[in-house]
Image (cartoon, grey):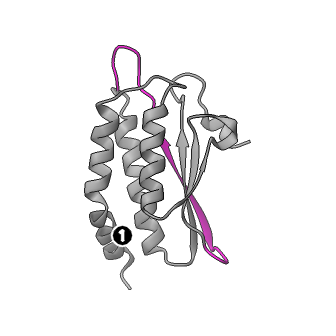
């Protein structure tokens, strides 16, 4: 098994979905704490790809946690952050639309390439530009 080649194949398999998600979020920028559409797009995609999804993670209405792969006895655990809030009057100048789409794609790739040795999560992280919601997600 060639892990690098496995990663490349898995990334390529989900490339179109990641790009579409990126464009969808970029075309509908939502400010911190108001990312209802963005969050729903991510949740829907994660579920359509077979991920187990917990919505309103840590009590935040626009946060989620998705499990791309759950190992029985993980050798390691991986968490990828998907931030998706936009800046006032600028939109996604911060690139969160790209970061989040890449995080979902990477989670899927690592889940496939890592086989049963890793537990891989995606955390939908809202309000990064204001209150830094990931702080609340780690407590």
Q: Position of residue 125 (x, y in %)?
A: 54, 39
Q: Which quadrant would residue 63 be assigned to in this image?
A: top right
Instruction: Report the magenta residues as a range.
Output: 71-91
Residue 88 colored in magenta in the image? yes
Q: Is residue 125 placed above or below 11 in the rendered structure?
A: above
Q: Which quadrant would residue 64 be assigned to in this image?
A: top right
Q: How many marks?
A: 1
Q: Position of residue 33 (x, y in %)?
A: 55, 26
Main SS type for the magenta part? loop
Secondary structure of residue under mark 1: helix
Q: Which quadrant would residue 60 be assigned to in this image?
A: top right
Q: Is residue 22 left or right of residue 134?
A: left
Residue denoted by label 1: 7
Q: Is residue 104 left or right of residue 60?
A: left
Q: Nearer the viewer, residue 16 or 61?
A: 61
Q: Outermost residue, right direction? A: 139
Q: Nearer the viewer, residue 86 or 56?
A: 56
Residue 72 colored in magenta in the image? yes
Q: Residue at x 68, y 43 (%)?
A: 138
- The residue carrying pointer 1 sits among few (fewer than 14), some (14 to 19) or many (20 or more) residues within 10 Å by Cα, namely some
Q: Outermost residue, bottom direction? A: 1
Q: Residue at x 40, y 35 (%)?
A: 96
Q: Is residue 109 placed above or below 22 in the rendered structure?
A: below
Q: Is residue 19 placed above or below 113 in the rendered structure?
A: above
Q: Position of residue 117 (x, y in %)?
A: 57, 76
């Amino acid at each position: 098994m060639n892990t690098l080649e496995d990663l490349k194949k898995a990334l390529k398999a989900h490339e179109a979905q990641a790009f579409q998600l990126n464009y969808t979020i970029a075309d509908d920028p939502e400010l911190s704490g108001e990312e209802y559409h963005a969050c729903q797009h991510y949740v829907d995609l994660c579920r359509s790809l077979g991920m187990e999804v917990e919505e309103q993670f840590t009590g935040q209405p626009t946060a989620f946690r998705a499990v791309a792969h759950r190992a029985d006895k993980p050798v390691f655990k991986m968490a990828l952050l998907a931030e998706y809030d936009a800046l006032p009057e600028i939109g996604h100048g911060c690139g969160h639309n790209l970061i989040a789409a890449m995080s979902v794609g990477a989670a899927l790739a690592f889940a496939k390439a890592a086989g049963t040795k890793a537990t891989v999560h995606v955390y939908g992280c809202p309000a990064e530009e204001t209150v830094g919601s990931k702080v609340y997600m780690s407590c």
